Image (spheres, rainbow, N blue to C red):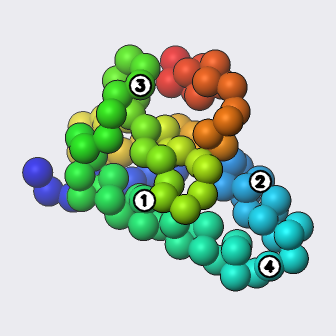
Amino acid sequence: MAQLEVYFRPLALDDIADAAAFYAQQEDDRLVRRFLNAIDQAAERISAFPLSCPKYHRNARQLMLRRFPYCICYRIIDDTVQVLAVLHAKRDVVLSRRRVE
């Protein structure tokens, strides 16, 4: 399978901005950069291997970030990966499922 284009929906971009703002409050710019790099690396992995992550609800899949307690929730539509949410792993699962609906 060829690499798929990864599209972040607006709410997922808001999730990333919120998490980056939280890390920025820790007054460590390196932490923000590492978080954003982890998102980029995860998007590359999802693009290259979109079926490698487990399904968690309907046709949605999720990928846990390696060094941060966040998961990327996405679904595959044709030749595109739509990122639905980037949520803290401890957050309510209902919210991520609502985004899939």
Compare marks 3 and 4 and give the one earlier in the sequence. Answer: 4
Q: Position of residue 51 (x, y in %)?
A: 23, 41
Q: Secondary structure at mark 4?
A: loop
Kindly indicate the quadrant of the structure image that contains residue 31: bottom right
Mark 1 surroundings: few (<14), some (14-19) or many (≥20) residues within 10 A = some
Considering only vertical position in the picture, is 47 above or below 12? below
Q: Return the residue at label 3.
A: 56
Q: Return the residue at label 4.
A: 28
Q: Is residue 60 left or right of residue 2?
A: right
The answer to whether any part of residue 58 appears in the image is: yes
Q: Is residue 64 left or right of residue 69?
A: left
Q: Which mark is residue 42?
A: 1
Q: Which mark is residue 18?
A: 2
Kindly indicate the quadrant of the structure image that contains residue 28: bottom right
Mark 2 surroundings: few (<14), some (14-19) or many (≥20) residues within 10 A = some
Q: Nearer the viewer, residue 57 or 84?
A: 57
Q: Secondary structure at mark 3?
A: strand
Q: Amino acid at mark 2?
A: Asp
State how far apart marks 1 and 2 are (Cα): 18 Å
Compare marks 1 and 4 and give the one earlier in the sequence. Answer: 4
State how far apart marks 3 and 2 are (Cα): 23 Å
Considering only vertical position in the picture, is 68 above or below 101? below
Q: Amino acid at mark 1?
A: Ala
State how far apart marks 1 and 4 are (Cα): 22 Å
Compare marks 1 and 2 and give the one earlier in the sequence. Answer: 2
Q: Position of residue 17 (x, y in %)?
A: 72, 58
* Residue in view at x 51 percent, y 50 percent: 8
